Image (spheres, helix red, strand yellow):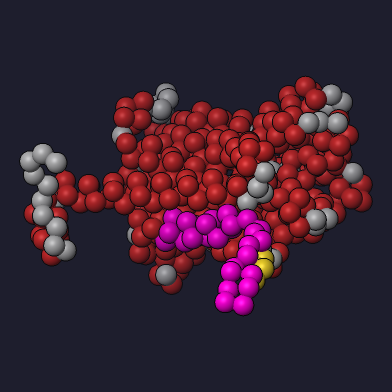
Amino acid sequence: MRTHKRSILKAATADRRALWMSTIAFTACFAVWTIFSIIGIQIKEQLGLSEAEFGLLAGTPILTGSLARIFLGIWADRFGGRLLFTLNMLAASAATALLVFANTYPQMLLAALGVGLAGGSFAVGVAYVSRFFPSGQQGTALGIFGAGNVGAAVTKFVAPFVLVAWGWHAVALIWAGALAVMAIVFWFTTSDDPVIAERRRAGTSSKADGMDLSLLKDVRVWRLSFYYFFTFGAFVALALWLPRYLIGVYGFSIETAGMIGAAYSIPASIFRAYGGVLSDRIGARTVLYWCFGVSAIATFALSLPPTDYVVHGTRGAIAAHFEITPLVFVGIVIVLGFFMSIGKAAVYKHIATYYPDNVGSVGGFVGMIGGLGGFALPIAFGFVNQVTGLWTSCFMLLFVIVTILLLWMHVSIRLTERQANPENARRSDAERGLSPISGSV
């Protein structure tokens, strides 16, 4: 681990500056992208929105940010991440400022579409940062960049206090102003990536005008996309859902719920960098096994609803009660966030390894699917909550998803190993007392 850290720190000045400024910029973008997790609660009361209308408003930036990742990733491969990142931040900043002029629900939705562009910055940053580092350092570099997810914690920790003091308009204007300043600072402190610089020196242009659609025939692209649906999509969904969950289940104030939400978002963000280091050191596949395995255990525990039951003992009935206390809940959620964070880094380590010439486009597609998880899952949480009447049903759904992904990954790995080395696979089966499959069953 020390070797990887030292190699990143000893990178050229321009490389390090590109990495750290991109990480800070992505943090600002993510803080704006998740702004509705806090201001949406007051907007809902102000406009008298139904639960469905509120869900659509909160999810609109997540949806547009996810869809934007495809074309932003393609454009970043073609025109360079530095230009795209700067323009994207300025556009998202303007849309966030326009929120204060929205007086109706349709106007609010229109502004939210622009706010979502902040989430599309991830695909741009991945394409930009990856070009500064060799393959052996890309996991660590992209993990550090991805730690910008901590912007969600910034919003949850700071925005409730600004909202209570000055109202949601102040939150929108301050966040918009900070993002605009960040765009200017980013432009003047970074340089074009090596690929773009070489193209300009040679007077050539990108050969790719769009995403190579043949890549979508590769099942690995889809498998990685669904891995990211959980590791990132579920992270965003919980980042949006937790304040409401904590207020509904434990009766917390919005300030307390926001701080607990930040306690979840911080490890689910900053340890992404550590996930990148681990992916470089022990392999992204091993990291994903740990991510899905521990996440399955955590979501199963959190899915258990408060229960009153009676045990018929030798001396009569014994009444008992089971419930996850707030302290235990927070502890498990933090653990869940940590393993989600290292899983996110492992997914993008796979992309940088398998598709070194298409990191922006493939990363954009995978990021889109993951972002769609952040849009669809809160809606699904509300639906299963309404159908079952159980607050913990959201974690039941996540348990089912992560279990399916764990089994899918394991089966895929075993099949790949058999195809790559059938003799070793047969020997391994024989050692475990398994006979080869033959004939009809």
Quarter of the picture holding the N terminus: bottom left
- Examine the rendering and report whether any part of residue 54 can be seen: no
Identity of the residue drawn at 20% across and 51% down: 417
In percent of width and height, residue 272 lies at 52, 57
Q: Residue furthest bottom?
A: 315
Taking the image as drawn, is residue 282 in sight?
A: yes
Q: Nearer the viewer, residue 368 or 40?
A: 40
Is 170 inside the magenta-drawn segment? no
Q: Which residues are magenta?
A: 290-317
Instruction: Tell me which residue sits at (71%, 50%) in the image.
Output: 245
| Along the line of sight, the residue nearer the viewer: 132 or 285 | 285
Quarter holding the C terminus is top left
Q: Where in the figure is residue 42, as x and y percent of width and height?
A: 85, 40
381 left or right of 275 in image: right
Quarter of the image holding residue 329?
Answer: bottom right
Q: Is residue 294 magenta?
A: yes
Quarter holding residue 41: top right
Asked if 107 appears above or below 222 in the picture, the reply is above
Pinpoint residue 377: horizontal percent, then vertical percent. Answer: 58, 40
- Which residue is rendered at x = 63% and y = 73% of the image? 316
Q: Nearer the viewer, residue 189 or 402?
A: 402
In percent of the image, x 74 and y 54: which residue is there? 249
Q: From the viewer's perspective, tell me whether residue 409 is left or right of residue 161.
A: left
| Front residue (pair 103, 249) | 249
Q: Quadrant of residue 95?
A: top right
